[in-house]
Amino acid sequence: MREIIKMIVVLSAICGLSGFCLSYLKQLTAPAIENQVLTYVQGPAIKQVLADTDNDPIADRKKFTNPATGKEINVFPAIKGGKLVAIALEDFGAGFGGDIGVIVGFNVENDTLAGIGVTTMKETPGLGTVVADARFTKQFKKQPMNVDLKSKGGQIDALSGATISSTGVVTAVQNAAKVYQAIKSEATGTWK
Amino acid sequence: MASMWKEFSKGLWAEIPPFRLMLGLCPTLAVTKSANNGLGMGLAVIFVLALSNAVISLIRNIIPKKVRIACYIAIAASLVVAVELLMQAYTYPLYQQLGIFVPLIVVNCIILGRAEAFAGKNPVHLSIADGLGMGIGFTMSLTFLGALREILGYGTLFGHHLFGPGFHPVHFMVEAPGAFVSLGLILACMNLMSIRKAMRRGEKPAENPMPGCESCRGCAMGRD
C-alpha cells in the first residue's frame, strides 16, 4: 500500500511541477512568439499583399474588436504619401485538410481587393497547395469585395483538381470582407 | 574530475549515439537535409539530454522503480515542450524547418536510453557530463551527415554555394533513400576503422564491432 501511495505522490508531484513551470514559461515567451509568428508566418503574405507602402504594416498594426462577433483581430495598415491607402487582415476558410489562413488586403478608397496571400494551410501538396501560388492569387487583385467562384456566378477560376481548396480560399476572402465592412469606419478613423 | 572527462568523452567517439550506439536514428535520417538543420536539432537535443540527465539524476533516489519509465518520460517531455517554446520565441525559421521532429525529441531513444542506463544510477555531475558528451556527439554526427548530404545534394554548405554553376547536384542525396545509403556507408567506414585498429593492436577483431548492446543495459540482452 505504501508503495502505491509513494508512486502516486511522486508521479503527481513531477507532473504538477512540470505543468506549473511550463505554463509560466509559456506566459513568459508569449510576446516573443507572437512577434516571431507575425514576422515569419504572416509577414511574407502581408508583404505580398501590401507591396508599395511608406510604413511597416506589421509594426503599425492595431487590434480592433469586430462589433458583429466581438472577436479581436489584427489589422495591418498600408500608408503612402501620409494617407491610408489599404488595410489587410487575416481570416480563415475551411479547406481540404483544415482551415486555410488568408491575408486579404482592401483598398480603402473604392473598397476593392488589393490582393491576397495564403499564410497557413494543410492542403494536398502539389494539388491544393497551388492556391498559394501567384497564378491563383493574382485573380483577386482589384476585384470587388464580394468575390465568388465562377461556378457560382463569380469571377474566380477554381483550380482543377483542387475545388475544395479554392472554395476554402474564397470563403476566407468573403469572411474577411465581412470583417472589413464591420471595422472599416473605426480603422479609417485611426489612421487618417 | 578524471571520471567526469571519461563520461564526457565517450559520447564524442567511442560511444557516439547514432553511429555506434545506434540510438536516435530517426532524426538523424530525417532532419539532415542541410547542415544547418542538423546543427539546430543537435543543439536542441543537447539542451534536453543534459538537463534531463541532471534532473533524473537529482531525484533518482525518490523515483520508485516500478514507475521510473513514466517519470523519465514526463521529465523529458516537459523539457522538450520548453525547448519548443524557446525555439518558437527566438529561432522561428529553424522551428519551421524542423517541423514535427522537435516534439519527436521526446521519444528519441538517446534521451530514454541514457536516462535508464546512466542517469538513473549515477551522481549528478557524471550524468551531466554523460548527457553533454552524448549530445555533442549527436550534434557532430548530425552536422557531419547534414553537411555531406547538403554538399552533394544542393551544392551548398550552411547556405553558401560552394561550386560554380557547372556543378550538377545529386538530388538523390537529399531524398530519404540517400539518407539511408549515406548512413550505411558511414557505419561501414566506422566498422572498418575499428577492425583496422584492432588488427594494429594485434587483437582479433570482434565479430560485430558495434558496442551497442553492452553499454545500453536497457534490457536483459546485454547482460550475459
Image (cartoon, coloured by chain):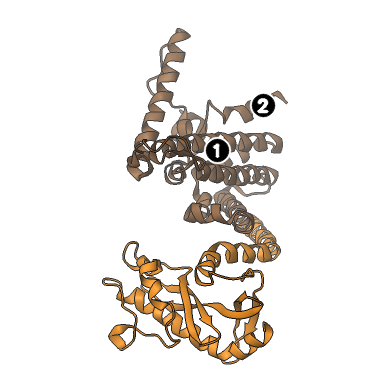
| Gap between marks 2 and 1 measured at Cα | 18 Å
Corner quadrant of residue B171:
top left
Q: Give the left or right position of residue B43, taking residue B151 as reference.
A: right
Corner quadrant of residue A42:
bottom right
For chain A, the rendered hue is orange
Q: Look at mark 2 in the image and give the residue it sits on.
A: B5
- Residue type at the position of mark 1: Thr
Q: Give the left or right position of residue A28, taking residue A66 as reference.
A: right
Seen in the picture, residue A142 relative to A124 is either above or below; the reply is: below
Disc nearer the start of the sequence (2/1): 2
Label 1: chain letter: B
SS category of the residue bearing label 2:
helix
Q: Position of residue A172 (x, y in %)?
A: 45, 80
Q: Look at mark 1 in the image and give the residue it sits on.
A: B139
The image quadrant where one finds the C terminus of chain B is top left
- Residue type at the position of mark 2: Trp
Say which residue appears at 54% left-offset and 67% top-offset: A47
- In front here: B24 or B89? B89
Q: Position of residue B30 (x, y in %)?
A: 43, 46
Q: Report crowding for label 1: few under 14, some 14 to 19, many 20 or more residues within 10 A (C-alpha).
A: many
